[in-house]
Image (tube, rainbow, N blue to C red):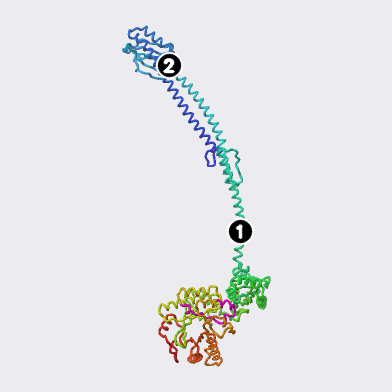
């Protein structure tokens, strides 16, 4: 039975096609046979009726005189003539009284004569047909003729015709079966083969299979199209396989790259923080098992940010790469060199018998750094601060060792940089330093930083001509932190630029606010660092704030210290000249304590010299201090600059500065630093200051 079933559990297409063809043929043949039979039967019966009718009319005409004259012999003669037709089995003449007048019965037959005359017309019954026809003579009805007619010839003819129709039907059925077979061979079988091929390809996924075809009809076009589709699929499959292989190779490569990126620094190719911590953990476990010491050296470059900002990040990156190569070159086989991030590197010393081993490595690092780095036509001299922690004496876990090394590294920076330090317990106050650094990173976003303003008085006019903006920080946990504490930290962790730009924006906003309140116009001085001036977008940031708050640029004064000229004089001078072109005033802060050479004043675009407060504080007790103050005032005036004396706290200091023609004074003798709203009130209340032995404000 399964031989006849297709893919869907039903009959095969070829069998269904054969059944359909044969079924249609049988239906047509049956209908044709029935139509032929009915047509022949009806035609034969009509012919027979006509023959019987004519026979009856003929006998009626011949026997009419016999009935009219009651001539029985003439009636028998008329019936005898009727008997010539062998199909007539019985003939009966009835008179007008419906009585039998004469009869004829074919010999050998036993057919009863009806006593009662049947109704007129022709009646068919079995193999006989009867007819009753009236007999008239000159228009008068004389009687009736009754005939029984044998119609077996008609039945035989029907049977014969039926046999012929059956024969034709069987021949037609045979021909339809043959035609169905031929149709199946040329149509159904190729389709079935195509279906089997599809099923095979579906299970084997072998797209190299093909179906042979030599025909050019629509089915041939279909098969060739299917073969072409298989060729396209095979080619696509091969392409996908090649693509999959390439993708697998690429995924494997990307996995390796991701693993490398996750564990190695992209710039220096050294282990990164993640891998370093893992190596540090392994080194600690190994040292613990072998009961040996291990050491960690944390190396932080000094003044790297200045190099990065002034010469560009590409030079800074090359410097880090060159340093990584040098550090790798001096490390031992058991040591590991890695980069924590930024300009911080780590050397893990896996086998240390005594602290001197770590010290020797630190000295090697110092020696390597003493050699200049030549990068893109720049000859760079750099130094580093190194912190050293030892397992198990300083800490017994990776985080602890790294933290102790960080603490000792900052101790090295405090000792003047280009130094190394071992950790000791006296450095434990580093926790406060780390907490300070952590909270400083969020100080601006938490709105903990604010500005206060200390008035500056012009001695000649006795009016407040300006204020210095001083940054303050109040933290909920740490309380008030002085700038001397958090500004150096901001420089070290790279936040100083963000703080400076915030301060300039806040000062410009404050000037705009005072103008809106009709506060008497004054100038505001803001402190900036060398790192700020080396920022590529620093001047643009200042310009944007001036335009945003619509202030007069001459009311903004930027204070810089002398030591900014120790490095990158050209870059800083260029930045200051751009600021001067904007209309911003430039002041040199802490004059007399920094750069010893005065040659920079010749080309430096300054407007103000601000005398360091340490000289003002000693006016009353040191002749040298008084001489320095007098010389500074004279130098400033000779260069066409104004001079400001800060930290003025006594009448003696004030009187001496007047005697030396100092231009502007600033200090608690005038007023302490005030909040913006308080200063607005102070300015409006003191248009002119009469200074005597009592300070104006405290």
CA distance for labels 2 and 1:
103 Å
**Which class describes the residues within 10 Å of circle 2: few (<14), some (14-19), or many (20+)?**
some
Instruction: Locate residue 581, reporting x and y percent.
Output: 51, 77
- Direction from residue 378 to residue 20 in the image, left or right: left
**Eyeballing the image, is 204 above or below 214?**
below
- Residue occupied by mark 2: 150
Whether residue 180 is visible? yes
Q: How many other residues sit within 10 Å of disc 1, few (<14), some (14-19) or many (≥20)?
A: few
Location of residue 521 by image quarter: bottom left
- The residue lying toward the viewer, choosing from 551 and 218, is 551
Q: Is residue 405 above or below residue 87?
A: below
Image: magenta residue range:
552-574
Mark toward the viewer: 2 or 1: 1
Which residue bears the numbered disc 1? 250
What is the number of callouts on the image?
2
**Element on which disc 1 rests:** helix
Q: Quadrant location of the C terminus?
A: bottom left
Circles 2 and 1: CB atoms closer than 8 Å: no
**Image point (49%, 29%), residue name:** 29
Mark yes or no: residue 391 visible: no
Query: Is residue 564 inside the magenta stretch?
Result: yes
Magenta residues, dominant SS class: helix
Q: Position of residue 249 (x, y in %)?
A: 62, 57
Expressed as whole percent of the image width and height from the top left, the position of residue 397 reads 59, 73
Q: Secondary structure at mark 2?
A: strand
Which quadrant: the N terminus?
A: top right
Residue drawn at x 47%, y 21% is 159
Image: 561 above or below 337: below
């Amino acid at each position: 039975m399964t031989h006849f079933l297709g893919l869907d559990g039903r009959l095969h297409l070829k069998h269904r096609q054969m059944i359909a063809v044969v079924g249609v043929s049988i239906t047509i043949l049956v209908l044709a046979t029935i139509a032929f039979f009915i047509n022949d039967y009806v035609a034969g019966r009509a012919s027979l009726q006509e023959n019987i009718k004519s026979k009856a009319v003929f006998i009626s005409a011949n026997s009419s005189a016999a009935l009219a004259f009651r001539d029985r012999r003439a009636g028998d003669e008329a019936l005898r003539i009727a008997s010539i037709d062998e199909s007539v089995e019985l003939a009966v003449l009835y008179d007008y009284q419906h009585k039998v007048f004469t009869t004829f019965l074919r010999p050998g037959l036993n057919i009863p004569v009806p006593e009662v005359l049947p109704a007129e017309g022709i009646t068919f019954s079995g193999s006989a047909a009867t007819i009753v026809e009236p007999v008239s003579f000159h228009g008068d009805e004389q009687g009736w003729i009754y005939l029984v007619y044998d119609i077996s010839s008609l039945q035989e003819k029907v049977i014969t015709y039926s046999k012929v129709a059956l024969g034709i039907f069987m021949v037609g059925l045979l021909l339809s079966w043959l035609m169905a077979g031929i149709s199946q061979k040329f149509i159904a079988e190729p389709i079935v083969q195509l279906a089997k091929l599809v099923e095979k390809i579906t299970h084997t996924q072998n797209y190299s299979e093909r179906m042979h075809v030599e025909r050019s009809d629509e089915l041939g076009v279909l098969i060739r199209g299917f073969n072409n589709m298989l060729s396209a699929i095979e080619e696509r499959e091969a392409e996908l396989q090649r693509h999959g292989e390439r993708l697998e190779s690429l995924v494997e490569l990307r996995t390796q790259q991701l693993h490398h990126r996750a564990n190695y620094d992209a710039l220096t190719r050294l282990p990164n923080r993640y891998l370093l911590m893992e190596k540090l953990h392994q080194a600690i476990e190994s040292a613990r098992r072998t009961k040996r010491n291990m050491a960690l050296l944390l190396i932080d470059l000094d003044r790297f940010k200045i190099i990065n900002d002034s010469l560009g990040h590409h030079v800074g990156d090359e410097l880090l790469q060159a340093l990584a190569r040098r550090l790798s070159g001096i490390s031992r086989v058991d040591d590991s060199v890695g980069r924590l991030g930024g300009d911080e590197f780590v050397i893990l010393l896996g086998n240390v018998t005594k602290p001197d081993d770590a010290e020797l490595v630190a000295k090697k690092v110092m020696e390597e750094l003493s050699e200049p780095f030549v990068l893109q036509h720049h000859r760079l001299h750099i130094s580093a601060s190194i912190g050293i922690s030892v397992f198990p004496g300083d800490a017994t876990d990776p985080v602890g060792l790294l933290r102790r090394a960080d603490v000792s590294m900052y101790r090295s920076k405090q000792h003047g940089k280009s130094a190394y330090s071992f950790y000791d317990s006296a450095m434990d106050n580093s926790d406060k330093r780390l907490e300070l650094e952590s909270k400083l990173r969020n100080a601006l976003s938490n709105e903990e930083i604010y500005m206060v303003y200390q008035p500056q008085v012009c001695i000649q006019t006795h009016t407040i001509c300006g204020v210095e903006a001083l940054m303050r920080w109040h933290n909920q946990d740490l309380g008030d932190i002085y700038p001397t504490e958090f500004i150096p930290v901001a420089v070290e962790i790279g936040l100083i630029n963000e703080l400076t730009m915030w301060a300039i924006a806040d000062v410009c906003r404050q000037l705009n606010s005072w103008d809106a309140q009709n506060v008497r116009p004054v100038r505001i001085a803001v402190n900036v660092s060398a790192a700020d001036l080396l920022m590529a977008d620093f001047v643009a940031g200042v310009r944007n704030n001036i335009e945003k708050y619509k202030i007069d640029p001459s009311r903004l004064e930027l204070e810089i210290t002398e030591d900014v000229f120790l490095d990158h004089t050209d870059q800083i001078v260029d930045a200051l000249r751009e600021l001067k072109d904007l209309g911003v005033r430039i002041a040199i802060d802490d004059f007399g304590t920094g750069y010893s050479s005065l040659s920079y004043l010749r080309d430096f675009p300054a407007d103000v010299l601000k005398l360091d407060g340490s000289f003002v504080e000693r006016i009353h007790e040191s002749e040298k201090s008084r001489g320095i103050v007098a010389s500074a005032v004279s130098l400033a005036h000779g260069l066409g600059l104004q001079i400001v004396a800060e930290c003025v706290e006594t009448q003696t200091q004030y009187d001496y500065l007047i005697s030396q023609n100092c231009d502007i004074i600033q200090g608690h003798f005038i007023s302490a630093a005030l909040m913006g709203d308080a200063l607005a009130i102070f300015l409006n209340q003191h248009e002119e200051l009469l200074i005597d032995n009592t300070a104006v404000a405290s």
